[in-house]
Amino acid sequence: MFPNDRRYTKEHEWVKVVNGAGTVGITDFAQKELGDIVYVELPEIGRTVASGEVLGTIESVKAVSELYAPLSGTITEVNALLSDKPETVNLDAHGAGWVCKMSLAKAGELDALMDAAAYVTHVGE
Amino acid sequence: MTGSDIKKTPLNRAHREAGARMVAFSGWDMPVQYTGVIDEHLAVRTRAGLFDVSHMGEVSVVGRESLDFLQHVTCNDVSRLSPGRIQYSGLTTPEGTFVDDLLVYKQREDDYLLVINAGNTPKDVEWLRYHAKGYDLRLEDVSDQWCQIALQGPRAQTILEGLTPAGLSSMKYYSFVQDTVSGVPCVVSRTGYTGEDGFEIYGPTASAETLWYAILGAGAPHGLVPAGLAARDTLRLEAKMALYGNDIDDTTTVLEADLAWIMKIEKGDFLGRDALVRQKAEGLNRTLVGFETEGRAIARHGHKALSDGKEVGTVTSGTFAPFLKKNIGLAYLPIALTRPGSRFTIDIRGRSEPAVVVPTPFYTRAR
């Protein structure tokens, strides 16, 4: 249900790290909670963020939710598809619905995040 | 609120079996969505949707002085109703503000049914009982005896026709009949909270599942889907129908709320009449208007409206409108800013988003 190739935050973001670069999104659990997503406020490319900082917002018909940086680093790319098709996050939160990519600043931060098994427990609570 | 305090409608199991996402709403465990708010909203606008509205309250008012009493506590003219007709009205305070908005059904002479908001039922019943003292009538909270199911959309009549001998095609909007639906004795009214054609079906609580599944079955070939509270809210807002607690409450007068059409001063005295007559003579300071925002962010209840950097009003309801595909809302604004085309800004999470007043309703169905 939750892929093993990435780590998870308590606020329901995921980050998949390959060669020091992270791809960030929200989990399938989070998109279900939000309902139909109509707007994703993407971070600016080049922005440097600390872990836990607000990256942007994800707005559904009934609620708005803040997106938090799972790790510290610099935004290198954003998913332009989400400007036209924000519902992609609902349809494929772990894949095509990725929100942004970042280069990572601090090694070791990743270890503090949950793996898939721990995240399953977290949302089962 | 503990799990045991929350109330359940007779359709609770049906919603859970359908995989509905449930939410606590006004003390009730209710379905907020099944397949998704946008899907359900569009289904109602193009085919039909089925809503469990059994959480609504019903109060029976029967007796020789029931008309006099209802004329006293509501702002609309109850004497205009003939048996089988319904009117939208307000239960008003002496200040001309809202205790609740409601529907008044006239069953026969001296026999009325009031349909009130779920969250206001205990408050309304207490208010009604207090003001009924001295009137020759019997007042009864019959909410527990009824389930209520709303079938809404252009295909509603076609779907319901197969289940009832009642002549639906000759039923006028805001009228009702008593007849069977799937063999169950019901009240069927041509009313709704979506801006579409449709029916609200009141039946005995023991028959709720029978009615629900019968209608879903009859509606399947027509694309009928169950619809939840999220779609109920987006639909009513597109149709510019007020939501108590958001757009109207005991601080907003009937006139400020843009509901002058449900107020009939000439009918005689009623609670709040003096205050409303005075307000009309003096002129309003503010009124409820519809707006659109131009950006992607959605204005929500409580967001502040600004003009020239000053706070001038508040957003009472806001959403992305799934059929119109734009961001819409309602706000109380100063009279000077209420003409369609007037521009203002809304503080949405610290950013000033441009907004413009538009005529309402935002959506009107084709007739």
Image (cartoon, coloured by chain):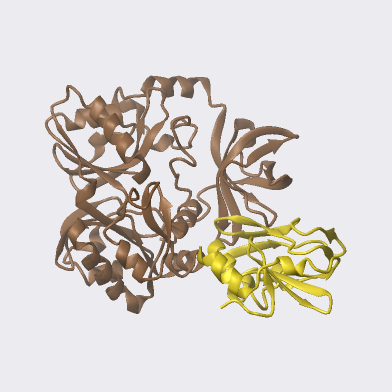
Chain colours: A yellow, B brown
Residue depicted at 34% across the width and 38% down the height: B89
- Rendered location of residue B366, percent (x, y): 44, 61
Residue A32 in sight from this viewpoint: no
Left or right: residue B268 compared with residue B272: left
Q: Examine the rendered structure and indicate whether residue B9 appears above or below residue A5.
A: above
Q: Residue at x 15, y 29 (%)?
A: B65
Please tell me in which quadrant of the rendered image residue A87 appears.
Answer: bottom right
Q: Say whether residue A39 is visible.
A: yes
The quarter in which the C terminus of chain B is drawn is bottom left
Relative to B360, B260 lies left or right: left
Q: Position of residue B325 (x, y in %)?
A: 59, 62
Residue in view at x 74 percent, y 46 percent: B351
Front residue of B200/B339: it is B200
Viewer-side residue, B88 vs B147 = B147
Q: Residue A85: name its quadrant.
A: bottom right
Position of residue B194 relative to residue B118, above or below, is below
Q: Is residue B127 left or right of residue B226?
A: left
**How many callouts does the rendering have?**
0
State the image quarter where residue A39 is shown. Answer: bottom right
Residue A38: x %, y % from top left: 62, 63
Q: Where does residue A43 sit, x and y in percent of width and height?
A: 78, 61
